Image: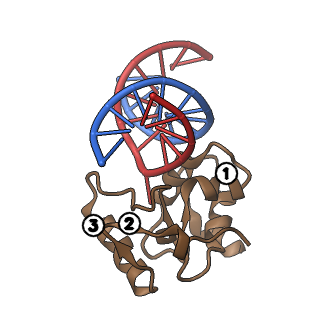
Chain colours: A brown, B blue, C red
DNA sequence: GATCAGGCTCTAA
DNA sequence: ATTAGAGCCTGAT
């Protein structure tokens, strides 16, 4: 997990917080998903769901961090604003892990990871 | 669903 | 240093 830190390379975003978040995201098992708020909570940062998103947005596709396993509380991918590419990548990755996306949504009931 | 308000950080001026 | 705008959010109208 030290590599995650190095891999992070967050521009600013209080590295400490970023690291905590990344460490949590890094342990999300294959084929499972979690929400931003969940990650924040697990990282010990109750109301920082948004920060989680910000941190992840700084990651490269190349990163070993499974950022694609993090979606919003509605089970949707929170990228469809002006970012089609990111959305497609995330969706493709999830599908390749066996995570079903029905009508643009993932079922937390089936694929949700409730912590370690 | 769509909208609103709450909440917290980042960036730029 | 202060202010204002914006963001991969959430839970409640």
* Viewer-closest of A54 and A71: A71
Q: Are marks 1 and 3 in contact (CB under 8 Å)?
A: no
> Are labels 1 and 3 on one chain?
yes
- Residue placed at 62% from the left, 63% from the top? A22
Q: Residue A116: which quarter of the image?
A: bottom right
Give the Cα distance between marks 2 and 1: 28 Å
Q: Which residue is mark 3?
A: A85
Q: Earlier in the sequence, mark 1 or mark 3?
A: 1
Q: Percent x, y for residue A57? A: 45, 57
- Residue placed at 54% from the left, 70% from the top? A109
Give the left or right position of residue A109, taking residue C5 as reference: right
Q: Which residue is mark 1?
A: A17
Q: Percent x, y for residue A3? A: 66, 75
Q: Chain of mark 3?
A: A
Vertical relation: B3 (above or below) C10: above
Q: Chain of mark 1?
A: A
Give the Cα distance between marks 1 and 3: 27 Å
Give the class, few, some or many, for how many residues have Cα within 10 Å of label 2's Cα (few <14, many ≥20): some
Give the left or right position of residue B4, taking residue A42 as reference: left
Q: Earlier in the sequence, mark 2 or mark 1?
A: 1
Q: Chain of mark 2?
A: A
- Residue placed at 39% from the left, 56% from the top? A78
* Viewer-closest of B12 and A54: A54
Give the class, few, some or many, for how many residues have Cα within 10 Å of label 1's Cα (few <14, many ≥20): some
Q: Which mark is residue A105?
A: 2
């Amino acid at each position: 997990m030290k590599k995650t830190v190095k891999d992070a390379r967050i521009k600013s975003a209080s590295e400490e917080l970023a690291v905590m978040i990344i460490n949590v995201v890094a342990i999300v098992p294959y084929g499972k998903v979690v929400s931003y708020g969940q990650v924040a909570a697990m990282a010990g940062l109750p109301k920082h769901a948004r920060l989680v998103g910000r941190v992840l947005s700084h990651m490269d596709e190349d990163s070993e961090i499974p950022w694609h396993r993090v979606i919003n509380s509605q089970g949707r991918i929170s990228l469809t604003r002006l970012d089609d590419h990111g959305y497609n990548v995330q969706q493709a990755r999830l599908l390749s892990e066996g995570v079903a996306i029905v009508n643009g949504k993932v079922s937390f009931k089936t694929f949700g990871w409730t912590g370690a």
